[in-house]
Amino acid sequence: MAGTMTGRTALVTGAGSGIGRAIALAFANEAADVVVADIDENGGKETVRLLDQSGVRASFLRCDVSKGDEVKGMVERTVKEFGRLDYACNNAGIHNALPGALADVEQEMWDRIIAVNLTGVFLCMKYEIPQMVKQGGGVIVNIASLAGLLAEPGSPAYTASKHGVMGLTKAAALDCIRDGVRINAICPAVTDTPMLASAPEEVKEYLKNLHPIGRFGRPEEIAAAAMWLCSDLSAFVTGTGVVLDGGASAL
């Protein structure tokens, strides 16, 4: 599919590292211009540097997706700079630092996870969809998680937030199904990202054993699924979640 997105613009949140960076680079490989959004300025600017090597136009925008005014500004600046918004990948998210039972979750942590993971996706779609409808179409991909379909032990807030992303994805897809806007989600199991790298070795070994395939997912594999969902090859796909889990949900 290389080069199939020439003249189009993609917006990727949480693109300063990990899955988001891989998706931004995959868009560039398809010749799309890319807006990199993140709260991590250093990481975001490094992603832009890598994109510049691909020969596409790229720009960094600092954005906290839990804040409506910042999200609105992010979409407006994307359209002002690049003229349109064809693809949006709402990837920004956080996880609880340590596992724990629901009764032990501090409300501050609950509020923050829901604000970023769920409200953030709501706010992004709230401002992305009208622009896409206005210009005659577009594609949105929300990064959910296998925890959006199954409970992740020790992570009640994260599980609730990602189940919410799946519900929002379905509802939003039906809202604009006749407007030329397709909306889907990707549900990865544990993926080898900087967030995972900081975990203790015994935790990583435990998590790896949950995957029958015997390894973690790779950011590039998630990015490949996002490119398929954004392409015309998936023109009949909307309102669903694509599972990439190394067989974990087949157990």
Image: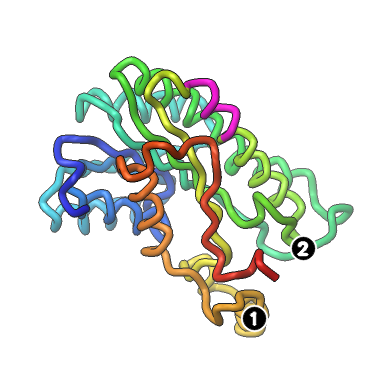
| Left or right side of 186 for 139 | left
The location of residue 49, given as percent across then percent down, is 20, 56
Question: The C terminus lies in which quarter of the figure?
Answer: bottom right
Establish if 144 lies above or below 201: above
Residue in front for this viewpoint, 240 or 78: 240
Instruction: Report the magenta residues as a range.
Output: 170-176
Instruction: Give how far across and how far down residue 96 sits, in percent.
Output: 67, 57
Residue at 51 percent of width and 26 percent of height: 68
Amino acid marked by disc 1: Asn
Magenta stretch: helix, strand or loop mostly: helix
Considering every residue shown, the one lying at the far top of the view is 134
Badge 1 marks a residue whose secondary structure is loop
Provide the residue designation for mark 1: 209
Q: Residue at x 40, y 64 (%)?
A: 221
Q: Residue furthest right?
A: 103
* Closer to the eye: label 1 or 2: 1
Circle 2 SS class:
loop
Say which residue label 2 marks: 153
